[in-house]
Amino acid sequence: MRFFSLRLTIRSAEHSRRESGFTLMELLIVISIMLILMLIAIPNFSGMKMQANETSAAQSLRAIAQAEIQYETNYPAQGFACSLPALGGAASSGAPSPTQAQVLQGDLASGQKSGYTFSIVNCTKVNVNNQDQYTSYEATAVPQAVGKTGHRGFCIDQGGEIKVDPAGGTNCTQSMQ
């Protein structure tokens, strides 16, 4: 009887030791499943981030076009602005002026936002009453790293239509859909 009770005690101790934790094999299986899920999720996340950057770039171009209209209204002798800093400026720097009109938010006026680089190019200048006046412009948005921060480049001009360059540059020939 004594032998039987000692054997029962040893078996109970071994049994409770097994139940108190995970085996190495169980842990490896759980880690493998987690790695597989991460490998599935990471590419989807980067694709969603690029899509968000492209949406932000298109909206930012609309904001630039709106700022250009305000600039032309406020400074008709200047016409359009031919640089982003002219559209920007901080209220703390004094009253708005043709060089700092304060009609565009600071991060966009710096030319970098959400993985895209923005610029104003192809400005047409005419001389009216001995004063240079810009009568047209084109604002562009190109990914800082094509394929990583965005796939497509975007352009807008004084007409207000956003066009797309599928290669990520400034050769915008396709209408945005």
Image (tube, helix red, strand yellow):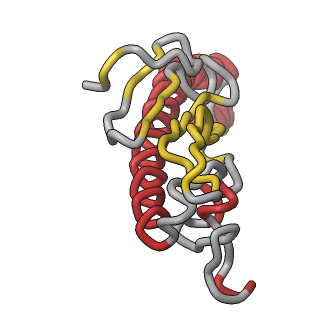
Location of the N terminus (image quadrant): top right
In the depicted structure, whether residue 120 falls above or below residue 37: below
**Which percent across, then down, holds residue 52?**
45, 39
Query: Depth check: 3 or 98 in front?
Result: 98
Q: Quadrant of residue 102?
A: bottom right
Residue that appears at 69% across and 24% down: 145
Residue that appears at 69% across and 22% down: 24
Query: Depth check: 132 or 67 in front?
Result: 132
**Which percent across, then down, holds residue 46?**
54, 28
Q: Is residue 16 visible?
A: no
In the depicted structure, whether residue 101 falls above or below residue 82: below
In the depicted structure, whether residue 75 falls above or below residue 18: below
**Which percent across, then down, holds residue 47?**
48, 25
Q: Is residue 58 visible?
A: yes
Residue that appears at 48% across and 45% down: 135
Q: Total marks drawn? A: 0
- In the picture, measured across the screen, residue 103 lies left or right of residue 111, that is left
Query: Depth check: 73 or 64 in front?
Result: 73
Name the outermost residue toward the left: 177
Residue that appears at 57% across and 59% down: 129
Location of the C terminus (image quadrant): top left
In the depicted structure, whether residue 14 falls above or below residue 132: above
Q: Quadrant of residue 144?
A: top right
Name the outermost residue toward the top: 167
- In the picture, measured across the screen, residue 161 lies left or right of residue 157, that is left
**Which percent across, then down, holds residue 101?**
59, 72
